[in-house]
Amino acid sequence: MIYLKIFLSFMQIGLFSIGGGYAAIPLIQNQVVEVNHWLSLSTFTDLITIAEMTPGPIAVNSATFVGLQIAGLPGAIIATLGCIFPSCIIVSILAYVYYKYRNLSTVQSVLKSLRPAIVALIGSAGLSILILALWGENGFSFNFTDINFSSLFVFVVGIFILKKFKPNPIYVIGGSGILGIIFYFITY
């Protein structure tokens, strides 16, 4: 029964993940944290961090990690298949339709109208993770004494380095991880 529930949950995520992995984060969070209560928000944030650092699509990596956490190796396989199944079907159909009708202005209009929704989904996911990093699981508060200042420092430094020097983001992620480890050992 759990395997069917995992498959259907990740099939739903795969079906409605328009815009790629970052756009899927709110959908994954909804299914994994809020609807099924498989993971806490804190564990989910750790999972997204690992999924971003691991090669491959974020949604597929997340599905694999959640499935492994919930039901072992069979759960990982089933969650991954559930996540990619709708994409395989939809992409096959869309590829056929797109190559047949790609020059129509209606097709181009539909593609242009999807862009703002994708940006909103990505922004929502990023904001959720930022709020969790700065204020913890209690969520946003106007009480600025609740802010995790070490996380804020790492965030500001990371943004500054990305904007000023434009390095490979992997170096910034690695450096942020090292800073996080240093702050952890200093404060605990």
Image (tube, grey):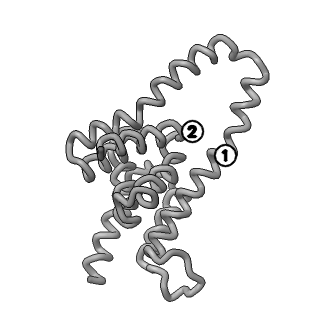
Q: Secondary structure at mark 1?
A: helix
- Estimate the x, y position of residue 160 in percent, counting from the top left: 53, 64
Res. 18 mark: 2
Q: Quadrant of the N terminus?
A: top left
Residue located 62% across and 45% down the image? 118
Q: Nearer the viewer, residue 136 or 68?
A: 68
Q: Is residue 140 visible?
A: yes
Where disc 2 sits, the SS reads: loop
Q: Which residue ends up furthest to the front in the rendered image?
A: 1
Residue drawn at (48%, 55%) of the image: 30
- Labels 2 and 1 touching (C-beta < 8 A): yes
Residue reaching furthest to the top: 100
Q: Earlier in the sequence, mark 2 or mark 1?
A: 2
Write down the residue under mark 1: 117
Q: How many marks?
A: 2
Residue 97 sits above or below residue 53 on the image = above
Residue 155 placement (x, y as % from top left): 48, 67
10 Å crowding of disc 2: few (<14), some (14-19), many (20+): some
- In the rendered structure, the answer to whether residue 106 lies left or right of residue 55 reads right
Evaluate whether residue 156 shows in this view.
Answer: no
Q: Is residue 37 left or right of residue 128?
A: left
Identify the amino acid type marked 2: Ile
